[in-house]
Image (cartoon, coloured by chain):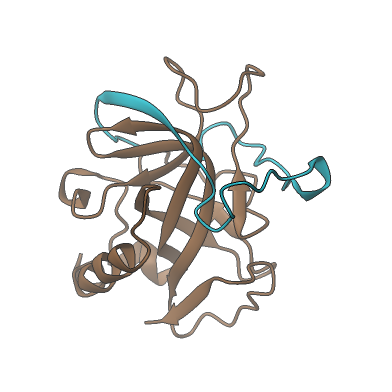
Chain colours: A cyan, B brown
Amino acid sequence: MQIGEFIRETYYPDPDEEPETVPTPDEEPEPVAACAS
Amino acid sequence: MRVLETLKPRLLLAAHRWEGPAPVGIRSWQLSISDGLLYPFTRMMRVLQPDPWKTTVAVASCARGDRPPCLGHPCGLYAVRPGAWDGISFVPDVSVFASVIVVGVVSLFGRVIEHKDGWRAERARIREVWVPVNAEVCFDAYPGVTFHRV
């Protein structure tokens, strides 16, 4: 997929989670196995 | 492009609806009729990817074992910037759309690499998906996602 040139890298919290909430390992979804998805 | 043209205003409205600090992008998947799961799909890739997004929130992986998305390596969960699709060849046309290629809106979070026409993200939350009206599929895998029939 062509999404153009790099601009910047940023970290964003989950927009549906409370800011202070940190997911526990048990809550982590399974990663998508394909590299570029 | 006729079907997508009719969807553009709805996709833009949906992207606006989910606007927030985290980027909101548009992307496509192949919706499997057999298992009701969304598989990554882009016309640029030419082949369907083997691994579906199994839940409402997808998490990227990297074959190199690094934390995705990597700089200098094309891993991550992709989405295009709303309104930037005219220059992006991944946008599905009528023929692929008719074969249950679907489009939708996602929020991107975690590590996110911004590009001129879209993003690569560590995580993506599926918000809304537009599905052909004749696709008889159960969407139980994606709680919280709104599926529109078109």
The residue furthest front is A20
Rendering quarter of residue A5: top left
Rendering quarter of residue B129: bottom left
Task: Answer with left or right where residue B9 lies relative to residue B108.
Answer: left
For the N terminus of chain A, give its image quadrant.
top left
Q: Position of residue B43 (x, y in %)?
A: 36, 46
Q: Residue at x 35, y 52 (%)?
A: B25
Task: Answer with left or right where residue B89 lies relative to residue B143.
Answer: left
Q: Position of residue B29 (x, y in %)?
A: 48, 56
> Compared with residue B49, is residue B67 higher up or lower down, i.e. above or below?
above
> Compared with residue A3, is residue B86 higher up or lower down, i.e. above or below?
below
Q: How many labels, in total?
A: 0
Rendering quarter of residue B19: bottom left
- B7 and B144: which one is in front? B144
- B104 and A7: which one is in front? A7
Q: Residue at x 67, y 37 (%)?
A: A33
Q: Position of residue B84 (x, y in %)?
A: 19, 48
- B22 and B13: which one is in front? B22
> Compared with residue B114, is residue B43 higher up or lower down, i.e. above or below?
below
Q: Residue at x 26, y 72 (%)?
A: B7
Q: Residue at x 26, y 25 (%)?
A: A7
Q: Position of residue B11 (x, y in %)?
A: 29, 67
The residue furthest right is A26
